[in-house]
């Protein structure tokens, strides 16, 4: 008798789905109130330095970790930084990259697109915010024998997880911002991540500053973003 090949994965056992069916009226109310809550979310660059308990950031990361991912490979690491010295080093390195970006490296069209938002190379939120959470995308995994394991749809998976994270932060009454210093290679080194991971988003997390401001702008209405066929 041949021994079974333990490397061949078997389908997982199926368990009942826990699904709470709601009356239609309640569904309407949930749909509306969730939309309205998410529509109140704004990206501000003005953070308070008031501390935020680690437990809250843990819940946002737990929530992000509930995101669907390619082949359920969960190709993400969330590195939460509160150490002031490390936040300062992240800020200094990000501002150095951003200086080059804003002073010539970026194509004119890109800088023009950013003008209405008023962004520049100064990133005080990276030291003002009590937490800076860096989302790393796992480019691949490792098999038990040490060989490389391909991960699928890592960009999509991490994008969805980031969305969950942002929604969780908003829902608990905090603010965050998706900062994308470019290039981001310095983060892997500063935060001691392996070569198999690539920094994707830098998200300061905290309370908004008392005088926080946001650009006056709206969102596209439904008929501009939805197509019904
Ligand atoms: N990475 C730069 C530039 C930037 C790019 C986009 I697209 C934005 O929506 C905002 C900023 C920065 O973080 O400032």
Image (cartoon, helix red, strand yellow):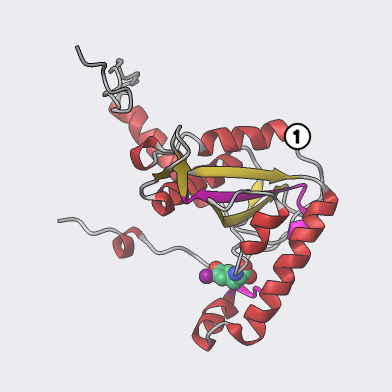
Residue 177, placed above or below residue 167: below
Q: Kindly tell me whether residue 210 is visible in this rendering.
A: no
Residue 83, position as x, y percentages in the image:
81, 46
> Where is the C terminus found, in terms of image quarters?
bottom left
The range drawn in magenta is 117-139
Q: Foreground residue, 130 or 103? A: 103
Q: Residue furthest front?
A: 1
Question: In which quarter of the view is residue 174 placed?
Answer: top right
Q: Residue furthest top?
A: 1
Residue 62 is left or right of residue 102, and the answer is left
Residue identifier under label 1: 53
For mark 1, give the secondary structure: loop
Residue name at image x 40 percent, y 51 percent: 156
Residue 174, placed above or below residue 101: above
Question: In which quarter of the view is residue 50 placed?
Answer: top right
> Where is the N terminus found, in terms of image quarters?
top left
Residue 212, position as x, y percentages in the image:
73, 59
Would residue 128 be counted in the magenta stretch?
Answer: yes
């Amino acid at each position: 008798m041949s021994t079974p090949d333990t490397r061949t994965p078997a389908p997982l056992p199926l368990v009942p789905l826990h699904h709470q069916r709601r009356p239609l009226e309640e569904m309407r109310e949930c749909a509306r109130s969730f939309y309205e809550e998410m529509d109140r979310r704004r990206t501000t660059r003005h953070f308070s330095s008031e501390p935020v308990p680690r437990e809250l950031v843990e819940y946002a990361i737990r929530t992000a970790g509930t995101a669907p991912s390619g082949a359920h490979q969960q190709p993400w690491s969330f590195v939460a930084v509160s150490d002031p010295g490390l936040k300062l080093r992240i800020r200094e390195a990000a501002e150095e990259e951003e200086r080059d970006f804003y002073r010539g490296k970026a194509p004119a069209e890109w800088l023009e697109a950013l003008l209405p938002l008023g962004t520049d190379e100064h990133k005080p939120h990276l030291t003002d915010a009590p937490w800076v959470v860096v989302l790393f995308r796992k480019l691949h995994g490792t098999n038990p024998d040490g060989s490389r394991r391909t991960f699928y749809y890592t960009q999509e998976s991490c994008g969805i997880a980031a969305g969950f994270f942002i929604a969780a932060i908003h829902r608990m009454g905090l603010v965050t911002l998706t900062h994308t210093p470019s290039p981001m290679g310095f983060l892997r080194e500063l935060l001691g991540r392996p070569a198999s991971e690539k920094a994707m988003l830098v998200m300061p997390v905290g309370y908004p500053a008392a005088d926080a401001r946001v650009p006056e702008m709206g969102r596209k209405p439904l008929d501009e973003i939805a197509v019904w066929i």
